[in-house]
Amino acid sequence: MSFSSTTKNELSRLPIQNRCCAIAELAAIVRMSGTIQITGMKRISLKFGTENAAIARRIFTLLKILYNTDVEVMVRKNKQLKKNNNYLIIVNSMEITTKILEDVGFLTDEDSSYYTIDYKTPENLIENRCCRRAYIRGAFLGGGLYQ
C-alpha cells in the first residue's frame, strides 16, 4: 500500500468534530472529485467515485450526518490491471443535491432559469482553523479519485 493510500485511510477514520468542519470537508471533496450531472428542467445529481473503501465510507458518513438522506452506493469490480473495487456514491435527490451544492458554496440560484457556478472557496467555510484543516483534509481525500 502506498504512503498516500495509507494516509488517506488514516484521515478517513478521524472523527467528525463539528457540522461546520463536515461542510468544509465535503466542500473540498465536491470541488476535487464530485461530478455534477445536470439534465433538463434543472434536474441535477451529485456523484463521487473512488477505489478506496475508507474514503467511500467517509463521503457516505458526511452525507448522512449533514443531510440524513438516502444515498446510493454502488460497488463494481475493476476488470483492468489491479482489479480493485470501484465505489460510486450517488445523491439522486434533486433537492438534496441542490442543498449540498449551495451549502458548499459551489452553486447559487440567483435566477430562476439557470444556476450560477462559483469556483472560489467561500470565506465563511474556512473562517475557523478547524474548518481550514477539514477543507485541506477533504482536498487531499478527494484528490486522485477516479472520475
Image: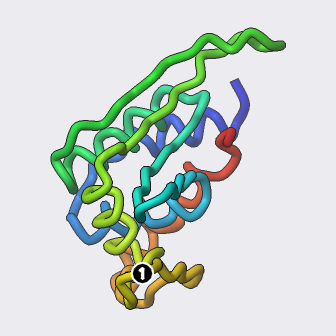
Q: Residues within 10 Å of mark 1 (few under 14, many from 20)?
A: few
Quarter of the image where the N terminus is located: top right
Instruction: State the scheme by which the image is colored.
Output: rainbow
Residue 49 is situated, as x and y percent measured from the top left of the image, at 56, 37
Query: Residue 76 at x, y = what percent?
Result: 56, 15
The secondary element bearing badge 1 is classed as loop
Residue highlighted by disc 1:
113
State the image quarter where residue 7 is shown. Answer: top right
Q: Nearer the viewer, residue 10 or 86?
A: 86
Vertical position of residue 101 compared to residue 94: above or below: below
- Residue 137 appears anywhere in the view: no
Q: What residue is shown at x 52% (from left), y 27% (from top)?
A: 87
Q: Is residue 106 visible?
A: yes
Residue type at mark 1: give it. Ser
Is 85 rendered above or below residue 2?
Answer: above
The residue sitting at 35% across, 83% down in the picture is 112
Residue 102, percent across and down? 35, 74
- The quadrant in which the C terminus is found is top right
Q: Nearer the viewer, residue 23 or 129?
A: 23
